[in-house]
Image (tube, rainbow, N blue to C red):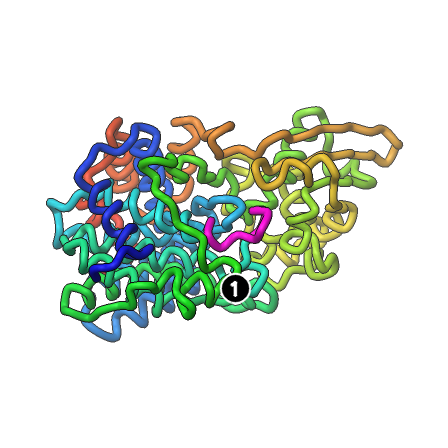
């Protein structure tokens, strides 16, 4: 590739980033995202989608692609991994497994820079695929899953940097990855275990794209911006000319990503916080006559509509996308940082008391929260008791983002809760200590400890 295109510019920037010191806020985000993602991988190790991915991987020799397939699926199995709004891209559930899968073979690679470059690339592709006013993902509007579409490109960047591609090869890897990016969201609506598998597929596809470029396969130079390129194909003609931009001159997007305190869809988080704050004011589930939670109108199709489907979700996994059910759980008093994985047992939907409580919770559009979206995820709440007493609260900005980041203790608590019971206590402690290091853990030092949860892949 001799002409200057989005792919060549992206490859040039990524190689430059790999040879430079990361900005401190970016380095710290990568450090925290590795810990967060490893915890999510362990928490998802025994989920149905992960076990299916592991059986599929074990049908052939376990190589980096097979490992990435399994680890990526596990990382996204609970929807507890980090996310950027409004792109709806979950960068780390794909990019961190990509690095982990390659770490044993490429121990000397610039892993933190490779992870950061892949994460940032994913967010920039997602940003280029927003609607005209920047408030919603065109991928989501068209039924595509933003995470696999965008992170396949990011994973190719990460894998390419780890295995040492040249600038020309890395640009081809981007072009190849554009043909491998895929994923539809119908499972969110009607069920299926495929959605977490998207993350594993994208991680493996990024590695395959990088290896293919190393073996001489070439991609179209205009895979991003061309007439039949990624932006035009997935977003429409009006988006094709959008530049991905340059983090060096414009600043990195990555530190604006949210680390989730709750294992639910991110749009439910301010509503969950409403319930947590109301409990702190003395509200109790058994006293509830009616709770009205106001959220941004833009999120209603995800967490509140159609109402009957949100009151009776198909599975405990789909309950994590229900405003009424997640708020009801938090109002009863959840675990962890306010709501935990243990609050979503297999028998959740047989809990008649919970479902009755959810029916008394209305999630509606609110002008104030709508005006603040997408820069801030906000919510209001009005609790009315059986006696007619009222309590009010307001959540200005959701936890886990740059304005209200999780503390070191909260990061550790989330990791411990995710990992406990999956690995022996000594292994959990060893991993936690490695991941808590001030400058972060060496990625290759984590792999064997993590893979103990995946005997098919060890």
- Magenta highlight on residue 129: yes
Residue stretch rendered in magenta on the structure: 127-136
Q: For residue 275, say whether it is visible.
A: no
Looking at the image, residue 331 sits to the left or right of residue 194; the answer is right
Would you say 241 lies left or right of 419 here?
right
Residue sitting at 78 percent across and 34 percent down? 383
Front-most of residues 417 and 87:
87
Q: Which residue is mark 1?
A: 236
Q: In this figure, what is the number of numbered marks?
A: 1
In the rendered image, the vertical position of residue 26 relative to residue 42, given as above or below: above
Left or right side of 111 for 256: right
Q: Nearer the viewer, residue 152 or 409?
A: 152
Q: Among all residues in the image, which is located at the extreme bottom?
A: 59
Picture quadrant where residue 141 is located: bottom right
Q: Is residue 166 above or below residue 61?
A: above
Is 54 situated above or below 296?
below
Q: What is the x, y in percent for residue 277?
A: 65, 29
Mark 1 crowdedness (10 Å alpha carbons): few <14, some 14-19, many ≥20: some
What residue is rendered at 39% in x and 59% in y?
Answer: 199
Does the magenta segment cover residue 263?
no
- Quadrant where the C terminus is found in the figure: bottom left
Residue 1, percent from left and from top: 21, 62
Residue extending furthest toward the front: 3
Q: Residue at horizontal 60%, vertical 38%?
A: 377
Give residue 49's position: percent from left, percent from top.
42, 64
Residue 369 visible? The answer is yes
Magenta span: predominant SS is: loop
Q: Residue at x 57, y 34 (%)?
A: 398
Q: Residue 438 location, x and y as percent?
A: 26, 27
Query: In terms of secondary structure, where does tag 1 sit?
Result: loop
Q: Which residue is outermost to the top? A: 281
């Amino acid at each position: 590739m001799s002409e200057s295109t989005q792919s060549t510019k992206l490859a040039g920037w990524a190689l430059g980033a790999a040879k430079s010191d990361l900005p401190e806020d970016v380095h710290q985000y990568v450090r925290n995202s590795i810990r967060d993602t490893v915890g999510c991988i362990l928490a998802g190790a025994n989920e149905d989608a992960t076990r299916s991915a592991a059986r599929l991987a074990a049908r052939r020799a376990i190589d980096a692609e097979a490992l990435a397939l399994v680890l990526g699926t596990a990382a996204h199995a609970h929807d507890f991994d980090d996310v950027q709004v409004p792109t709806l891209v979950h960068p780390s559930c794909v990019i961190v497994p990509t690095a982990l899968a390659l770490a044993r073979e490429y121990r000397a690679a610039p892993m933190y820079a490779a992870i950061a470059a892949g994460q940032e690339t994913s967010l920039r592709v997602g940003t280029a695929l927003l609607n005209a006013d920047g408030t919603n993902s065109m991928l989501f509007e068209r039924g595509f899953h933003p995470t696999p579409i965008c992170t396949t490109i990011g994973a190719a960047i990460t894998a390419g940097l780890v295995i040492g591609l040249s600038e020309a090869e890395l640009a081809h890897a981007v072009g190849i990855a554009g043909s491998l990016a895929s994923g539809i969201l119908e499972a969110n609506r009607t069920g299926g275990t495929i959605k977490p598998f998207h993350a594993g597929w994208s991680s493996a596809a990024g590695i395959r794209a990088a290896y293919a470029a190393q073996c001489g396969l070439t991609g179209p130079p205009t895979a991003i911006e061309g007439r039949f390129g990624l932006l035009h194909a997935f977003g429409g003609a009006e988006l094709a000319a959008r530049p991905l931009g340059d983090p060096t001159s414009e600043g990195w997007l990555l530190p604006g990503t949210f680390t989730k305190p709750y294992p639910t869809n991110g749009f439910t988080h301010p509503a969950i916080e409403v319930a947590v704050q109301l409990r702190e004011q003395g509200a109790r589930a058994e006293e509830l006559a009616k709770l009205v939670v106001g959220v941004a109108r833009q999120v209603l199709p995800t967490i509140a509509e159609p109402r009957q489907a949100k009151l009776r979700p198909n599975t405990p996994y789909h309950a994590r996308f229900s405003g009424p059910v997640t708020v009801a759980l938090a109002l009863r008093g959840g675990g962890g940082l306010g709501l935990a994985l243990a609050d979503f047992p297999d028998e959740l939907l047989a809990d008649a008391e919970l479902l009755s409580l959810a029916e008394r919770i209305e999630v509606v559009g609110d002008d104030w929260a709508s005006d603040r979206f997408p820069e801030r995820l906000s919510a209001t709440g009005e609790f009315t008791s059986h006696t007619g007493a009222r309590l009010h609260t307001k959540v200005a900005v959701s936890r886990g983002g740059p304005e209200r980041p999780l503390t070191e203790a909260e990061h550790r608590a989330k990791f411990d809760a995710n990992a406990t019971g999956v690995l022996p206590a000594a292994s959990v402690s060893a991993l936690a200590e490695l991941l808590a290091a001030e400058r972060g853990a060496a990625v290759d030092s984590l792999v064997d400890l993590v893979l103990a949860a995946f005997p098919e892949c060890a």
